[in-house]
Image: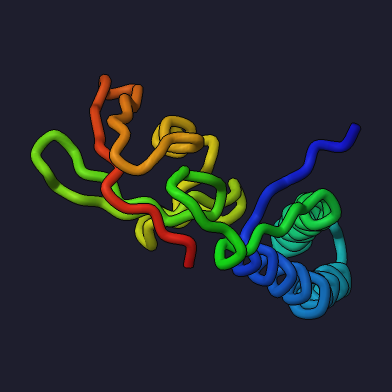
Amino acid sequence: MVEKVPMTIEGHNRLEEELKNLKHVERPAVIKAIEEARAHGDLSENAEYHAAKEQQGMIEGRIQMIEDSLSRSEVIDPRELSGNTVVFASTVTIADEDDKESTYQIVGVDEVDVSAGKISYSSPIGRALIGRNLGDEVEVKTPGGETYYEIVKIDFI
């Protein structure tokens, strides 16, 4: 059975845009660079050729990864969700032991952007929050030790 890859609408759209850019901009540019490097002669000592081939391999690998994720994607719209339980795509405000609040949206692995408050459902905090309710205390085990948080707000935006 194929394992579904959960992602938000925003994350799905961003992956589609990246795929389009890779296929229609990056791939043709690297093919042109390879052709130009070949024109310079001996390929065994042609650094430009080897760099372009390496870049081509990275682009093709990323295209395959994105196509795989998109083909297995399960798009979840947080606006269609509600309740007092933390689920994928919800936005959660938590308070630490010093009452310092942090807000995170639980997103898919390909969507993570900690500086924008987007954490993976498979991260230590994400795993600890999923399935918990408003007002629950949550213990998060991280490499730095255990930290306790209280869920103070759950939004679906």
Q: x and y percent of residue 118 in the render? A: 44, 55
Instruction: Identify which residue is drawn at 24% across, 27% down.
Output: 147
The answer to whether any part of residue 45 appears in the image is no
Q: Nearer the viewer, residue 98 or 122?
A: 98
Quadrant where the N terminus sits is: top right
Instruction: Identify which residue is drawn at 35% across, 58% down.
Output: 115
The answer to whether any part of residue 131 appears in the image is yes
Instruction: Identify which residue is drawn at 87% across, 73% down.
Output: 35
Query: Which residue is most to the front?
Result: 83
Q: x and y percent of residue 21 in the render? A: 73, 76
The reply, left or right, for residue 117 in relation to residue 100 is right
Instruction: Identify which residue is drawn at 77% across, 53% down.
Output: 73
Residue 62 position (above or below residue 147) = below
Residue 25 position (above or below residue 50) = below
The reply, left or right, for residue 153 in relation to residue 157 is left
Answer with the quarter of the image where residue 3 lies: top right
Looking at the picture, the colour scheme in use is: rainbow
Q: Nearer the viewer, residue 33 or 56?
A: 56
Residue 94 position (above or below residue 53) = above
Q: x and y percent of residue 135 in the render? A: 29, 39
